[in-house]
Image (cartoon, grey):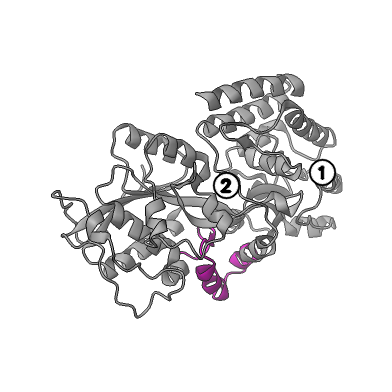
Amino acid sequence: MSPAHPPLSRPGVDPARRRLLGALLGLPVLATGGLSGCGVEEESPAQDGPVELSVFWYGGTKRAEATERALRLYSARNPLVTFRITWQGQGGYYDRLATQAAGGNVPDLFQIDDSMLGEYAQRGIVLDLGGYAEDGRINLNTLPPGLVDYGKIDDRIYGVPAAQTHASVVFNRALLRRLRVPEPTTSMTWADYLSWAARVTRASGGRVAGSMDPSGDHRALWLWLRGLGTKFYQGRQLGFGSAALLDWFEFWERARSQRATPAAALVDRADSGEPARQLVVTGHTAASFAWSHQFPELQRYTEDELALVGFPGPRAAQWDRASMYWAGFQGTRHPGVVANVINFLTGNVEVGRLLSLERGLPASLTVRQAVVQTLDDPLAEQVATLGEALHQQVGPAPAPPPKGHGEVRDLLTEAARSIRAGRSGARAATTQFMARAQAALAR
């Protein structure tokens, strides 16, 4: 059962007589990036009476506790605003959100990631936040421009990044020391990465494979394509052709022939991306692919010391990527209050310190600087160090994935599994994927 919680303060009563948008016009913005969030008397955005906002996100207990503290801080400064919160693990989150959308009862404020933002925007479910950004009620001036762009669909802002992350290779440092194999490095070529993984397998006598097989991982394919100067999506179509995908699948066939990756059944179990199933923590591989902000959680599942580096391929293949967004419901009765809370969660330094790197690096560079300076967790420090190393070298941000991306992602996983299991050849799987993916995007 998903953890559900009562209101954080006294229950609010929705003011049925009118929206709050007019009341919000002209109000000062809450403690954004340039403010410390301390010692400032902030006017409540709710002037017509109590307001209760429903809030929904996914994550673990640590994220829930930090987010609840941040929302309590908001209510302490805005006593007329309270929150009814619900949170759960990532598994099943979007199924529940889809059910809510079908019933027209989406939470006022909710967490969403790039896999679903485009679809929810095109379906008219998420609130257009552009007007609030234009007049400064949501201050995006301290965010990297590419990070802001990665929340835009058709030039409209539908999601404000809750944090930033990077695609990374998480590896077992302790194992590599025992095997006397050098560590992988950020931006090593894909060919060098394959050679390194095969060397690990040999050094372990075949007991541990060098790398997870990411042939069905859209994130890895996306960075591979960008390293080639190719796009994953071009508008609402695939941005790459059959030849590029065939090269990708055949690359990982070579990896399997060199025993650089583990058995297909092991890879299939880890394909979900669930941290506890990642092969680097189950002891089946020396390295797995993960988002950088997941690194501390991965470390909790193993006693061996882990470390992380950036993905293989050019650093410019990376971009300022939102780990997830805060979004509002198009049908909320309190759009201005929702915008005000989003601004507080993403731009307030005190909130940034409460949330730390739980969702990733703070989106605001001002907040990020303040938070990073106070980190005392070596794992979080590694995440911040990688982010800083990549920050000045990332490439331009693409548009978030379009509607149909979720199905495309599943089709890629299915194609890769079929090849690994020997049910189809790489060429046949490529042809089938291209046809089915284009059809999914066209619907």
Of residues 222 and 129, which is closer to you in this image?
129
x then y, percent, for residue 300: 57, 57
Residue at (77%, 43%) from the top-left corner? 209
Seen in the picture, residue 422 relative to 208 is either above or below; the reply is above
Quick one: label 2, few (<14), some, or many (20+) residues within 10 Å? some
The residue that disc 2 covers is: 276
Please name the residue that numbered disc 1 is placed on. Answer: 194
Q: Position of residue 38 (x, y in %)?
A: 38, 78
| Direction left: furthest residue | 17
Q: Quadrant of residue 345?
A: bottom left
Tag in front: 1 or 2: 1
Q: How many marks?
A: 2
Assign a secondary structure to mark 1. Answer: helix
Query: Looking at the image, which is closer to me, 244 or 65?
Result: 244
Of the image marks 1 and 2, the number of the one nearer the N terminus? 1
Magenta span includes 176:
no
Q: Quadrant of residue 107?
A: top left
Q: Of the residues shown, which amino acid type is indicated by label 2? A: Ala
Residue displayed at 43% across by 75% down: 35
Range of magenta residues: 355-383
Taking the spot 78% from the left edge, 55% from the top edge, the residue there is: 184
User: Compared with residue 84, is residue 269 higher up or lower down, i.e. above or below?
Assistant: above
The quadrant of the image that shows the N terminus is: top left
Residue density around tag 1, few if under 14, some if 14–19, many if 20 or more, within 10 Å: many
Percent coordinates x, y for residue 39 in the rendering: 35, 80
The image quadrant of residue 365 is bottom right
User: Callout 1, which amino acid?
Assistant: Leu
Residue at x-position 46% and y-position 51%: 325
